[in-house]
Image (cartoon, grey):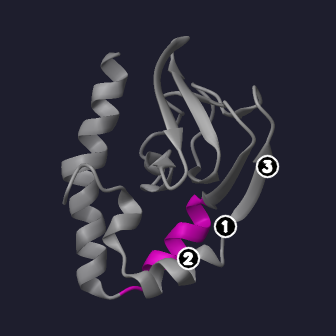
């Protein structure tokens, strides 16, 4: 798997359209917090519109924008029990929230080869990313 492609890059457009019918939508104003470092991680986020700032231990480490996903470790068998970063809206922010339960139901209906791609993504991209963030 390509580390520059998020977990959604593993799916076909048909599968992404199916998944897009499932998430909850959140709207945030500038300065509002989407998720907080240390809280329970049980979902991932996809920015639909706007920009957000990412902080680890109070230090600004990145800015994310439309089309980017965050928090995918919250979907992987609850591997990452807590959030590794705080994300705050920089502008008006529209976000799709995909819960662990919703994602697992979706994945359980996919072909076996796609499930293998998800497992490979976890092992080669998501897990190393998570471990790197733990060192920051």
Q: Quadrant of residue 48?
A: bottom right
Element carrying mark 2: helix
Of labels 2 and 3, the one closer to you: 3
**Residue appearing at x 76%, y 31% in the figure:** 30
Q: Are marks 2 and 3 in contact (CB under 8 Å)?
A: no
Q: Are marks 3 and 1 in contact (CB under 8 Å)?
A: no
Q: Main secondary structure of the magenta part?
A: helix
Depth order, front residue of 38/98: 98
Depth order, front residue of 123/44: 44
Measuring from the top left, give residue 119's x and y in whole percent: 26, 63
Q: Which mark is residue 23?
A: 1
Q: Give the residues in magenta.
A: 99-110
The residue where tag 3 is placed is: 27
Q: Is residue 111 above or below residue 88?
A: below
Of labels 3 and 1, the one closer to you: 3
Element carrying mark 3: strand
In this picture, residue 101 sits left or right of residue 62? right
Q: Are marks 2 and 1 in contact (CB under 8 Å)?
A: yes
**Residue appearing at x 66%, y 74% in the figure:** 22
The residue where tag 2 is placed is: 19
């Amino acid at each position: 798997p390509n580390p520059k492609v998020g977990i959604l890059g593993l799916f076909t457009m048909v599968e992404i359209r199916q998944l897009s019918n499932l998430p909850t939508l959140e709207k945030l104003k500038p300065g509002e917090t989407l998720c907080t470092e240390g809280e329970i991680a049980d979902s991932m986020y996809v920015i639909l519109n706007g920009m957000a700032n990412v902080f680890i231990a109070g230090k600004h480490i990145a800015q994310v924008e439309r089309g980017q996903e965050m928090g995918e470790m919250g979907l992987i068998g609850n591997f990452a029990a807590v959030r590794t970063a705080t994300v705050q809206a920089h502008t008006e922010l529209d976000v799709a929230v995909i819960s662990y339960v919703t994602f697992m139901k979706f994945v359980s209906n996919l072909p076996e080869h796609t499930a293998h791609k998800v497992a490979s993504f976890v092992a080669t991209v998501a897990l190393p990313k998570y471990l790197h963030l733990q060192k920051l």
